[in-house]
Image (cartoon, rainbow, N blue to C red):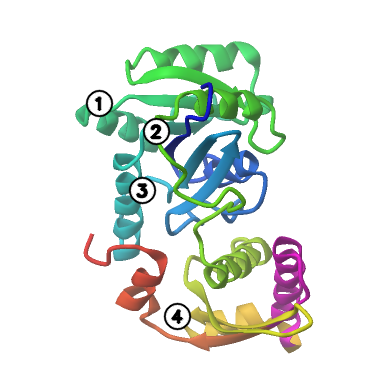
Amino acid sequence: MTGKTQHCGFVSIIGAPNAGKSTLINKLVGTKVSIVSPKVQTTRTRVMGIVNKGRTQIIFVDTPGIFAPRKRLDRAMVSAAWQGAAEAEIILLIVEVTRGKINADSLAIIDKLKEQNRKAILVLNKIDLIEKDKLLQLSSELYNTGVFTDVYMVSALSGDGVAGLLHDLAGKMPEGPRMFAADQTSDMPMRLLAAEITREKIFLQLKEELPYASTVETETWEEFDNGSVKISQVVYVMRDSQKAIILGKGGARIKMIGEASRLELEEIFDRRVHLSLFVKVRENWADDPERYKEWGLDPNA
């Protein structure tokens, strides 16, 4: 890449739930653009993270994990993941290696890539948690499927191997003008990002107590002359018993969630944040077409 020629392209990051896609995209971009939780299937919508290296712009698309869908929301998320892959110049399939074997969801993804005659780059994640001989055996086994053009070994959490991956991806981008401003790191609106950060804190705080029965909406966003912002959000759950879990005794848990979210939002937005959280019961929120529209999902997928 010489002279004044610009390069720009899309890289879709796909994989089974909890493979480390969101952690990887945050590390590649250098800032938080996608929520991270030890619980599987926390990414609900496609999230774009934007990296500029010289005259090259790489647009990473973090997708929901691909798995066997059972519910309407599951189907919409998996459909969004495959759509993200279809629209990208390059597909990264991320596989976490800690178990030393390929799980069923990853095998199903490989089979579908074969059906579509698509090539991908294999990214083996969490390499610091597996013995080297097992890692090499797994790498060889996956490469022999014939789907992959390259194999990279990384630890998305520590950043080991990520810089080399980013450098090589920049060299693969096609010629073309930037699609986003040079200082932009995501296409996600701030209101939606704020809601996603709070949703992440709910996952981290509640662990196994509350299943995937909650969502967060930013209802109001008010900016002030001193640079601060006042954000009001509603946490929707499906039952009164779930509302009680999120509130906690005397409202202690919702205060902890709000404080953790506020501190991270202040760091991301680089401004003072006043955050108010309310918990409401809405039994059918997961079937509301408006929620799907907000997440960029197709309710009829």
Q: Which residues are magenta?
A: 251-275
Disc number lying in front (4 or 2): 2
Dot 2, how many residues are within 10 Å of its Cα: few (below 14), some (14-19), or many (20+)? many
Asked if residue 83 shows in the view, the reply is yes
Q: Is residue 83 left or right of residue 195?
A: left
- In the rendered structure, which disc, 4 or 1, sits on the residue that comes first in sequence? 1
Can you give x and y, in whole percent of width and height, for residue 142 in the image? 41, 19
Residue 91, disc: 2
Name the residue type under label 1.
Lys
Q: Are marks 1 and 2 in contact (CB under 8 Å)?
A: no
Q: Position of residue 61 (x, y in %)?
A: 45, 46
- Give the labeled residue for mark 1: 114
Residue type of the residue flagged with mark 4: Met
Task: Rate crowding at label 1 as few (under 14), some (14 to 19) or many (20 or more) other CA atoms within 10 Å.
Answer: some
Check residue 266 for magenta coloring: yes
State the separation of the CA atoms marked 4 and 2: 36 Å
Q: Earlier in the sequence, mark 1 or mark 2?
A: 2
Q: Is residue 103 magenta?
A: no
Which marked residue is nearer to the observer: mark 1 or mark 2? Answer: 2
Give the foreground label among 4 and 1.
1
Q: Position of residue 252 (x, y in %)?
A: 76, 81
Q: What is the C-alpha distance between the residues marked 3 and 4?
A: 26 Å
| Label 2 or label 3, whichever comes before in sequence order | 3
Distance CA(mark 2)–CA(mark 3): 11 Å
Element carrying mark 1: helix
